[in-house]
Image: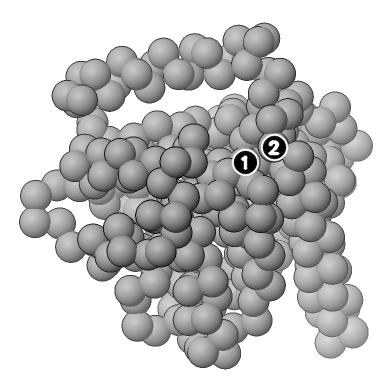
């Protein structure tokens, strides 16, 4: 595909995603959440954000900063409405999904720079949305999980208040080694994240001579101090092996990790809840993880005061 064809395909996919028929696949937003769109000012640019807040309001709620999937060439925040509205309404929490820049218009590392710059900006303006910046979570799926993992690593280095990370069918290795994991061959016939898709992303999104190690959490050396992680692997995913590999790396660095494998799930299964039954237990696990983790930290902070 040419860059122009990639853009046309993305626009067509976005139109389909917003159609009533596509809603039968992606699921409906939770009625207990209010969804609004905003912009945030970053150095030299503005980004759109999709904000999910519980209808019943509230203050000092956890802040979940989310990154959608799509291989850095596709995807929009609204593809995760079914998941993110549920977390906002049921946790409850303020969820902000970042509409980061995509290739081929913006080659990597543009998306990574957006994630790095968006996190502190969203933490700064969390108050007006009723969020507690001291209880921030990074969440992402697929390529979005790359951004969530990278922001969690950077937050540990800079002392930013990321308290947990949730990585859904994550891609965590963007080097050529991605093609050598056993799951890449074993799940080559999977309907999503096909080998052809994975190779196309590298060709379309990476500039020439780009060092993919710099944005591959699995290839980074220092993971110490990174926030505790919930990692959800899909058993029918070409990228499946990256999840346990990264869980091992985090544990070696002293990070608490919960790794769950959904054996009948395909890549991007949380965006297709009506087609993949595993989406509902995975969403429930996320909610339980957030509640237990954030409640525990909140109570500890109260006792310390």
> Residue extending furthest top?
20
Which quadrant: the N terminus? Answer: top left
State the residue position of label 1.
269
Instruction: Give the percent coordinates (x, y) of residue 19.
Output: 60, 10
Tell whether label 2 touches label 1 (CB within 8 Å).
yes
Q: Residues within 10 Å of mark 2 (few under 14, many from 20)?
A: some
User: What residue sits 52% from the left and 13% below the top?
Assistant: 16
Query: Could you say which quadrant of the image residue 162 lies in?
Result: bottom right
Q: Residues within 10 Å of mark 1 (few under 14, many from 20)?
A: many
Q: SS for tag 2? A: loop
Q: SS for tag 1? A: helix
Nearer the observer, 173 or 29: 173
Mark 1 vs 2, N-terminal side: 1
Q: Relative to 243, does residue 2 appear above or below in the rendering? A: above
User: What residue sits 67% from the left and 23% below the top?
Assistant: 25
Instruction: Give the percent coordinates (x, y) of residue 155.
Output: 49, 70
Query: Could you say which quadrant of the image residue 213 lies in?
Result: bottom left
Instruction: Give the percent coordinates (x, y) of residue 300.
Output: 84, 81
State the residue position of label 2.
276
Q: Relative to 245, does residue 179 appear above or below in the rendering? A: above
Query: Can I make out residue 231 in this image?
Result: yes
Q: Which dot marks residue 93?
A: none
Question: In 3D space, how far apart are the residues under numbered discs 1 and 2 (Cα atoms)?
Answer: 6 Å
Q: Relative to 124, does residue 273 appear above or below in the rendering? A: above
Instruction: Give the percent coordinates (x, y) of residue 165.
Output: 61, 64
């Amino acid at each position: 595909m040419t860059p122009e064809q990639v853009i046309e395909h993305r626009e067509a996919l976005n139109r389909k995603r917003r159609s009533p028929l596509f809603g039968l696949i992606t699921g409906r937003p939770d009625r207990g959440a209010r969804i609004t769109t905003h912009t945030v000012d970053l150095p030299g640019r503005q980004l759109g954000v999709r904000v999910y807040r519980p209808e019943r309001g509230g203050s000092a709620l956890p802040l979940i900063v989310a990154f959608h999937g799509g291989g850095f060439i596709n995807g929009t925040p609204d593809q995760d409405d079914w998941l993110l509205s549920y977390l906002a309404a049921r946790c409850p929490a303020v969820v902000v999904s970042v509409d980061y820049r995509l290739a081929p218009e913006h080659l990597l590392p543009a998306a990574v720079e957006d994630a790095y710059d968006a996190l502190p900006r969203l933490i700064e303006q969390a108050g007006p949305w009723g969020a507690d910046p001291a209880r921030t979570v990074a969440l992402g799926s697929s390529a979005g999980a790359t951004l969530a993992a990278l922001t969690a690593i950077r937050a540990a280095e800079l002392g930013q208040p990321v308290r947990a990370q949730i990585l859904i069918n994550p891609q965590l290795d963007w080097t050529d080694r991605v093609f050598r994991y056993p799951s890449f061959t074993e799940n080559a016939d999977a309907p999503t994240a096909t080998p052809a898709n994975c190779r196309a992303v590298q060709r379309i999104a990476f500039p020439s001579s780009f060092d993919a190690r710099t944005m591959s959490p699995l290839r980074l050396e220092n993971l110490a101090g990174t926030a505790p992680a919930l990692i959800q692997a899909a058993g029918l995913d070409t990228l499946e092996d990256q999840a346990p590999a990264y869980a091992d790396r985090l544990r070696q660095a002293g990070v608490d990790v919960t790794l769950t494998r959904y054996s009948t799930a395909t890549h991007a299964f949380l965006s297709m809840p009506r087609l993949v039954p595993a989406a509902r237990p995975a969403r429930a696990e996320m909610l339980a993880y957030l509640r237990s983790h954030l409640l525990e930290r909140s109570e500890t902070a109260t006792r310390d005061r």
